[in-house]
Amino acid sequence: MDGTIVDSTTVVETLWRRFSVEHGVDPEELLAWSHGRRTPDIVSRFLPAAHDVDAVVAELEAREMAFVDGIVEIRGAATLLTASPVPWAVVTSAPRDLAVRRMVAAGLPVPEVLVAAEDVEHGKPHPDGYLRAAELLGSPPADCVAFEDAEPGVRAALEAGARVVVVGSVAGEVTRGLDRVVDLRDVRLLPR
């Protein structure tokens, strides 16, 4: 969702930089690793010892819920999703309430199938979310196309067996040879 259909980069980076200052964490290291991952996974990796991870995660998620100014659609997302002739899902590392809040703030429809952070045991880069979404859509993963903007999501979708289209500029070994779009303005979904 974030970075694929919703542009929340400014909001997310502002909140994680604030967290970094509060907890003495290198913000550049955190931001380089965190994109596309669940908040509990990020906090567990970077939070100095002797902190209550659950309490810190709850506080961060409350901040995120309150901070929607500047959240917009990735160009073309609303048109693509509202006109889609095929079933679609969102697989996100965000909690369900936050995902819905951001999609609504960006003017996007909320899908019937939304696999959020709390719906899977393992977040991205594990394939659990994509496997669950394919199951709920009633399609084999190999018949699904995943749009992803971050390495953990690309890895998760590939491991699930989906075809992956990279949205934006993320590049690396895992994205080599994959289809790529700058945004969603020229993407069309067609039934098989």
Image: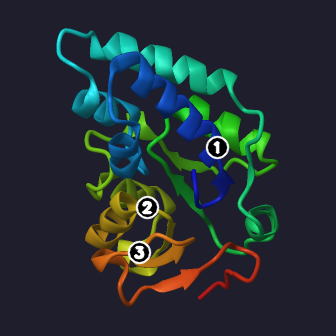
- Please report the residue visible at 29 percent of the width from the left and 35 percent of the height from the top: 41
Please state if 121 lies on the left or on the right of 182 as rendered.
Answer: left
Name the residue carrying label 2: 150
The answer to which of 101 and 28 lies nearer the viewer is 28
Of the image marks 2 and 3, the number of the one nearer the N terminus: 2
- In the picture as drawn, the residue positioned furthest to the left comes out as 49
Of the image marks 1 and 2, the number of the one nearer the N terminus: 1
Residue 82 image offset from top left, x and y in percent: 80, 63
Quadrant in which residue 70 is drawn? top right
Q: Which mark is residue 136?
A: none
Which of the image's four quarters has the C terminus? bottom right
The answer to which of 187 and 47 lies nearer the viewer is 47
Camera-near label (2 vs 3) is: 3
Residue 156 drawn above or below residue 182: above
Name the residue carrying label 1: 10
Separation of marks 2 and 3 at Cα, in angstroms: 9 Å
Amino acid type for the residue under numbered disc 1: Thr
Residue 59 image offset from top left, x and y in percent: 48, 14
Separation of marks 1 and 2 at Cα, in angstroms: 16 Å
Mark 1 burial class by Cα count in 10 Å: few <14, some 14-19, many 20+: few
State if disc 2 and disc 1 touch (CB < 8 Å).
no
